[in-house]
Amino acid sequence: MPHTSPTRRAATLAALLFAFALPALPQTPPPPHPQPHTQQPAPQQQHLHLSQWFAAHQNQPLAEQQKALAAEPGFSQLPQDQQQRIQHRLVDLNSMQPDQRQRYIVHAEAFHRLTPDQREQVHGAFQQLNQLPEDQRRAVSRSFRSLRQLPPTQRQQAMDSPAVAAQLNEQQRATLHHLMNVEHLLPPPEPPRPHTAPLQPAPPPSR
C-alpha cells in the first residue's frame, strides 16, 4: 500500500493551493531507517490531488473546510505563516465562480507535476508579470492569451510585429517574451472568447 509521510502530504496540498502564487513548499520526508542487513523497497509517493480534496469538502461551510485542512496530517508541522497563507488561499478558492475554480485546480495540479526547475521558471515569469502596474499587466495578459491561440510557428512573428510594439512598452514586451518562454509548461489555453481575435503576424513586406 502506498505510503506518504504526513509532512509530505501537507506540503503537497500546500503547493497545490499555492500554484502560480508562491513557489512549491519543500517536500522533504524523513529518511527511511531500514533494519540492518534488510533491504527494504523505497516507499511509493502518493500524489494528493487538490481536485479530490476539494470535491470531498466542497459541500461543507468554509469554516468546516478550514478545520478539515488544519486536521490534515502534517499540517500543524508547517510554519505558522504558511498555515495562514494556505487558509487564506482556501478562502479565495471558495470565492471563485465554479468554472474559474475548476480552471485554477487544473492549473494547480499541472503546475505541481513540473520539476522544481520548471516550477521556478514559471513562477519567475508570473512574478515578473505581477510586478507590472495593473493596466500594463492586463495588456500583457491579453497579448499572452492571444498569442497562445496562434499556431506555434506564427507566435514569434506576431511578437515582433508592429502591432505588439505599438501596444506594449519595452518592459511589457520583455515580460511577454518571458511568459512565452514558459508557455509550453502551462496547461492548454482556453478557447478564444466571442468577439475577440488573436494577434496576427505582421504581413510580409511588399516588394
Image (spheres, rainbow, N blue to C red):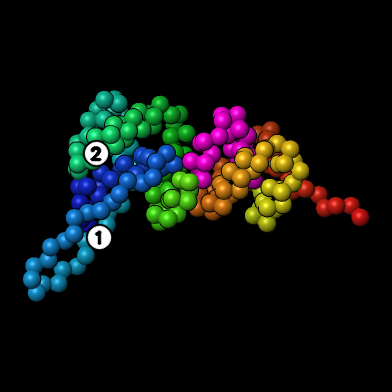
Label 1 element class: loop
Amino acid type for the residue under numbered disc 1: Gln
Q: Quadrant of residue 78?
A: top left
Mark number displayed over residue 79: 2
Does residue 204 appear to the left or right of 177 in the view shown? right
Residue 82 drawn at (x, y percent) = 29, 37
Mark number displayed over residue 44: 1
Q: CA distance from mark 2 to mark 1?
A: 26 Å
Q: Looking at the image, which is closer to me, 1 or 171?
A: 171
Amino acid type for the residue under numbered disc 2: Pro
Would you place residue 40 above or below residue 143 in this image?
below
Does residue 132 appear to the left or right of 98 in the view shown? right
Q: Looking at the image, which is closer to me, 100 or 9?
A: 9
What residue is shown at x 81% (from left), y 49% (from top)? 203
Q: Which one is earlier in the sequence, the residue at label 2 or at label 1?
A: 1
Q: Residue furthest right?
A: 207
Residue 135 drawn at (x, y percent) = 60, 29
Provide the residue span drawn in magenta: 125-148
Q: Quadrant of the N terminus?
A: bottom left
Main SS of the magenta part reads: helix
Q: Are marks 2 and 1 in contact (CB under 8 Å)?
A: no
Label 2 element class: loop
